[in-house]
């Protein structure tokens, strides 16, 4: 089956962002006299949206109203340091160049809040025609629910079974499977699929160039 489109996860797949995410969270917690954490802890907590991320990192029972306030403040802090330490993974630019030259449509689907997803893509990925770029929106279930993946397939006007879904977490593989897309897990990024493989996910790509072998 010829692949006509690719949906990429963002954090841990296209862009290494964890230092800036962790830095913003630690600024938030320091402001409120709460414990700060190291990168390894934040790696365990990301991937399911900002609310779950802050709830897990906070670690103590908190009211819905207070949690909402923390999340709002975290987003504001993070929006100000999106590109302090983040960077594209090595090899990603060449892969995106080649995909575009082959006429393959490319897009992004992330559980990062929608506005922040767009800001990261605008800063690091503006050289490529990613369309659409979708983060977590309140009215749409987050990954692994396939709703947003189906939305992208419709926007691309490509049948789901002709779309490759590339990501570094179980949410990405499960989304692809639920949407009837072709899953491709990657071993770079945050290593979740290396340590916690998903049934039926196949072999992990070890470097970005391997994506081109699949779509050739």
Image (spheres, rainbow, N blue to C red):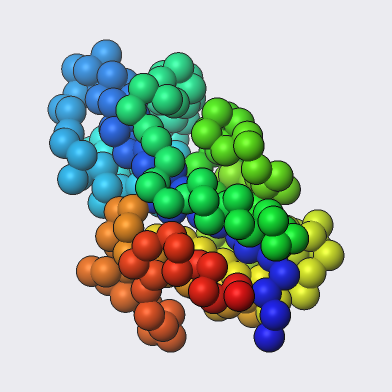
Quadrant housing residue 133: top right
Q: Look at the image and tell me in which quarter the C terminus lies.
A: bottom right
Instruction: Judge from the rendering whether residue 125 lies leftward or rightward of residue 32; answer left or right.
Output: right
Q: Nearer the viewer, residue 104 or 98?
A: 98
Query: Is residue 201 shown above or below 58?
Result: below
Report x, y in % for residue 74.
41, 25
Query: On the rendered structure, is 194 left or right of 135?
Result: left
Residue located at (33% from left, 53% from top): 189
Q: Find residue 49 and report its horizontal and vertical position in percent.
A: 46, 45
Q: Position of residue 48 (x, y in %)?
A: 43, 51
Q: Is residue 71 above or below residue 102?
A: above
Does residue 19 appear left or right of residue 50 in this picture? left
Image quadrant in which the N terminus is located: bottom right
The residue positioned farthest toward the right in the image shown? 157
Q: Nearer the viewer, residue 37 or 60?
A: 37
Residue drawn at (58%, 45%), measured in percent from left and top?
Answer: 136
Which residue is found at the position 45% from the left and 17% from the top? 80
Q: Residue furthest top?
A: 31
Picture mark count: 0
83 up-or-down from 80: above or below? below
The vertical placement of 84 against 216, above or below, is above
Q: Position of residue 47 (x, y in %)?
A: 41, 51
Q: Nearer the viewer, residue 169 or 206?
A: 206
Q: Is residue 66 visible?
A: no
Q: Would you identify the image quadrant in which residue 185 lies?
A: bottom left
Q: On the picture, is 83 further left or further right than 157?
A: left
């Amino acid at each position: 089956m010829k692949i006509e489109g690719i949906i990429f996860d963002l954090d841990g797949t296209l862009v290494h962002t964890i230092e800036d995410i962790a830095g913003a969270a630690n600024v938030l917690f320091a402001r409120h006299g709460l414990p700060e954490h190291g990168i390894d802890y934040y790696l365990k907590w990301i991937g399911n949206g900002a609310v779950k991320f802050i709830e897990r990192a906070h670690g103590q029972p908190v009211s819905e109203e207070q949690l909402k306030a923390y999340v709002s403040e975290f987003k504001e802090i993070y929006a100000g340091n999106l590109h302090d330490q983040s960077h594209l993974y090595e090899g990603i630019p060449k892969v995106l160049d080649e995909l575009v030259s082959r006429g393959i449509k490319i897009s992004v689907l992330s559980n990062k809040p929608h506005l922040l997803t767009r800001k990261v893509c605008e800063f690091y990925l503006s050289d490529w025609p990613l369309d659409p770029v979708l983060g977590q929106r309140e009215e749409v279930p987050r990954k692994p629910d396939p709703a947003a993946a189906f939305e992208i397939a419709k926007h691309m006007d490509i049948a789901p079974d002709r779309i490759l879904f590339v990501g570094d977490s179980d949410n990405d593989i499960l989304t692809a499977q639920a949407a009837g897309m072709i899953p491709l897990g990657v071993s770079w990024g945050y290593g979740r699929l290396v340590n916690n493989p998903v049934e039926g996910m196949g072999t992990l790509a070890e470097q970005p160039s391997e994506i081109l072998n699949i779509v050739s």
